[in-house]
Amino acid sequence: MMKKAFMGRLLAWLALALPLAASAADLKPDTQGRIAFDSFTPKTMFDLARERRQNWAPQRVWGELSLPRTAGDKLPAVVLMHGSAGVEASMSQWVDALNDIGVASFVVHVFESRGVKRTAENQTLVPYSADLMDAFQALMLLAGHPRIDASRIGIMGFSRGGSVAFQTAIEPLRRAVVKSDLGFALHIPVYAGCNQVYWSPQVRKAPLLNLVGAEDDYSTARPCEQLAERYAEAGMPVRSIKYAAAQHSWDAMYQPFFLEGATSAAPCGVLRWDIEPWKITAERTGATVDPARLGEFFDSCVTRGVHVGRNESAFRQSRADVKAFVRQVFFGDK
């Protein structure tokens, strides 16, 4: 009885500690700050892509919505997806940059919502499918906000979140979750992870701005430049910008240092999942990889230890480039 009473009090405390999940009907014109919403954790990307909903574990997630001080018409918005270190202090710089030009921002807490602090040392702690699912659920949530223009919602992601900024443009992945024509109006991957690519030539035609660091030894620049070229060939308006001397996390609030425990799959080359046949190809050799032997494949090439940290010049230029890109897409600025 004592155990049941304790569990009852614990559940009651959790219900108070976490905000109730919001739906479009719950959102008011002045709703901002922390907003909880319902999402899922698919076991694998295959479970998401093939819509195997029996393997989608329900998950409450939250994000932080910041509305600019702009009156009148509905606002554009950008969903912000964090990297392997979780939501860091540096994210506030991008919230401020977007709000400054009249754009709302919504910072999604993928890891914290699932009781995980970071995945840099072990990316399996949270499946990549969870990040992608949360991004689509955030899109649908914001589309129902009375102050948000559903036709002008973009996505910007960093590192692991940058991969999501690429993946959300893939139509078979979007259609597995979003059961309407709703989609992101722009995509901004920033020092994204581009060594594991989920691909289909069916892409949305929203503009994409790909930002990479010339000295990035974590995810490295060239695979992301090649991936952006692949999207361009499929019909997306794409621009890539490379920042000289910039390492991974050039917008970080800490000085550059060597992160010993971080895993990097860059030495493995690009591994491509073709979504329709679900065929996995190691692009460096052209060999097909058996899904059952993926662990063995990565064990043979994944390394530890990367450089991360702030590059002030790269941050200032990337902030200016992002603001100009968003203004152009959302407001038609030249």
Image (cartoon, rainbow, N blue to C red):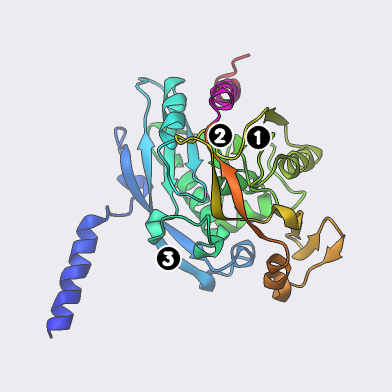
Question: Is residue 164 among the parts visible in the rendering?
Answer: no
Residue kind at label 3, given as amino acid type: Pro
**Where the N terminus falls, by quadrant?**
bottom left
Q: Judge the density around disc 1: few (<14), some (14-19), many (≥20) Cα neighbours within 10 Å.
A: many
Residue corresponding to mark 1: 213
Q: Position of residue 232 (x, y in %)?
A: 77, 37
Distance from label 1 to label 3 (Cα)?
A: 36 Å
Query: Disc 3 designates what residue?
Result: 58
Residue type, label 2: Trp
Q: Earlier in the sequence, mark 3 or mark 2?
A: 3
Judged from the image, the secondary structure of the residue bearing numbered disc 2 is loop
Which one is earlier in the sequence, the residue at label 1 or at label 3? Answer: 3
Query: Residues in magenta?
Result: 311-325
**Along the horizontal axis of the image, is 203 left or right of 322?**
right
Residue that badge 2 annotates:
250
Q: In the rendered view, would you say 289 is above or below 317?
A: below
Q: Check residue 168 for magenta coloring.
A: no
Residue placed most toward the observer, 47 or 9: 9
Q: Are marks 2 and 1 in contact (CB under 8 Å)?
A: yes
Q: Quadrant of residue 213?
A: top right
Q: CA distance from mark 3 to mark 2?
A: 34 Å
Residue 281 location, quadrant: bottom right
SS for dot 3: strand
Farthest top residue in view: 334
Q: Kindly identify the amino acid type of the residue bearing the numbered disc 1.
A: Gly
Mark 1–mark 3 CB contact (< 8 Å):
no
Q: For this rendering, which residue is in front, 183 or 118?
A: 118
Query: Residue 245 in the image: x percent, y percent?
Result: 65, 30
Q: Can you give x and y, in whole percent of width and height, for residue 27 in the image?
A: 32, 42
